[in-house]
Amino acid sequence: MNASAGDDDPVPPLVPLDEHNRALRDRVHPIDWRNPEASDRYNLVVIGAGTAGLVTAAGAAAMGARVALIERNLLGGDCLVTGCVPSKALIRCARAVHDMRGGDAFGVHVDAPARVDFAQAMQRLRRIRADISEHDSAARFRDLGVEVHLGQARFVDGSHVEVGGQRLAFARAVIATGARAAVPDIPGLAEVGYLTNETVFSLTELPRRLAVIGAGPIGCELAQAFARLGARVSLVSKGGRILPREDPDAGGIVASALLADGVDIVDAGRGMRSRRDADGKVLDIDGDGGTRTLHVDAILVGVGRKPNVEGLDLERAGVAYDAASGVQVDDRLRTTNRRIYAAGDICSRFKFTHAADAMARIVIRNALFFGRERVSSLVIPWCTYTDPEIAQVGLSEHDARERGVAVETIIVPMGAVDRAVLDGDEQGMLKMHLRRGTDRILGATLVARHAGDLIAEITLAMTAGLGLSAIGRAIHPYPTHGEVVRKAADAYNRSRLTPFVRRITERLMAWRR
């Protein structure tokens, strides 16, 4: 018999439950949804309807496969509900405020200080998120030929999954349950209360004083956004360094930008404790420079992600996993049960929407069409959406040294790019890493306002096996920020003009006169 969406789990709460969140809920976890009758056997059962699960299910169904998609929470997953979509909506509002306040440099004078209506900004966020959710709706995937089941999935054995009181038999299955916010073990934090990326976008009132714990991408993005929106923000990091996994020079540029926006970067290298007092929430922080006490109205935790492996009964299916790193997969994304695959944040160190999308496409080919695609062959860029942004693809200088690869690094400051100067966006640089003696691109780091868009050209060249010289031969519109990549190619070509080559060309020119 059919099972209602609520047989395993209640409909996830959305706060505030206004017209926009109701529209979101009605699309991605309808309260009146009835799970379909289970088919005899599926080509593919997909557990989790975030990016990896949705792409896998839609692609497989388009190829004629019989597909079941199971989601216990909201279709669209972290990206739609608590990640990419809401965070970038908030960042855009913060950038608008920043640009207004910086208008004097362009001869644009605002007579009164820019006033931020935080409630209206958050309402815009919820409206846009609800509009975008149509792409991920249960009804849309049903119309694509996917059988959508809402509820908690549990493996019965190596070829069956149970959801909503029904047993689904599969030839192949995909685990795409994603990850959630990790919470550090800080004494008193649970008692005091805290926000994560999963709850911060439910705010309707701007915290006057905000502590952000964790200076990775999530922490830095939201610290800068809230500071620009008017909060007094303290960014708490180990050692007082931000973005520790990024190129140090790139991280230094972003750190300067955060400081300019009023973010206080606090060293917590020796640990911290949380408590309450009459003034609200308190963080006692021990750093190399001594002890600091922060009085705040809210604490936002952004220290990374934890894979969602609980509740699936993976042991029954013979699927090996680790609570910290997630489901164990090989290079073809097969788990220790060769009938079951995994994709996305549940099994990858690249916890990005676009990486999950790419892995889903590999799973479709390998699971259904005898493919032998390898995840190690992917060229995966990533971007931190601070202002300026940091985008990275391939190897860094540190990575290359660890692997014993000799590199030549070309650096182009954004101040050398005319469009960046015209736009007032000189802050930033491009670092291009080439295999020494060749124009083969091993990696690049780009710091610029539009770095996430600009890195795509370099990613394409690396994917297609094109050298930096090929980029130099491509005509770039003038004036654009993309010229920074062409300038790197010009610098490489100039480096080939050695004194010996110069003498030869001088003699040739003399002979031709």
Image (spheres, rainbow, N blue to C red):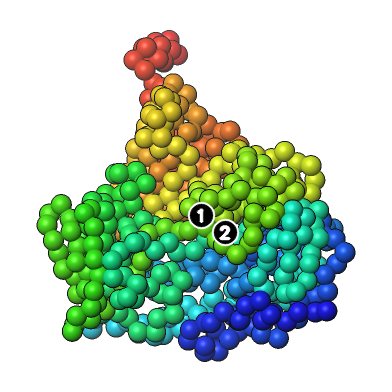
Query: Looking at the picture, does residue 472 appear above or below residue 296?
Result: above
Residue 134 in the image, given as x and y percentages of width and height: 65, 75
Residue that label 2 marks: 309
Q: Is residue 323 left or right of residue 190?
A: right
Evaluate whether residue 27 shows in this view: no
- Spot the residue most to the bottom: 18
Amino acid beneath label 2 = Val
**Image point 41% across, 35% down: which residue?**
399
Displayed quadrant of residue 55 = bottom right
Amino acid beneath label 1 = Ala
Residue that label 1 marks: 323
**Image point 19% across, 70% down: which residue?**
294
Task: Determine the CA span between mark 1 and mark 2.
Answer: 7 Å
Q: Are marks 1 and 2 in contact (CB under 8 Å)?
A: yes
Displayed quadrant of residue 101 = bottom left
Query: Looking at the picture, does residue 406 appear above or below residue 397?
Result: above
- Spot the residue most to the left: 290
Total marks in image? 2
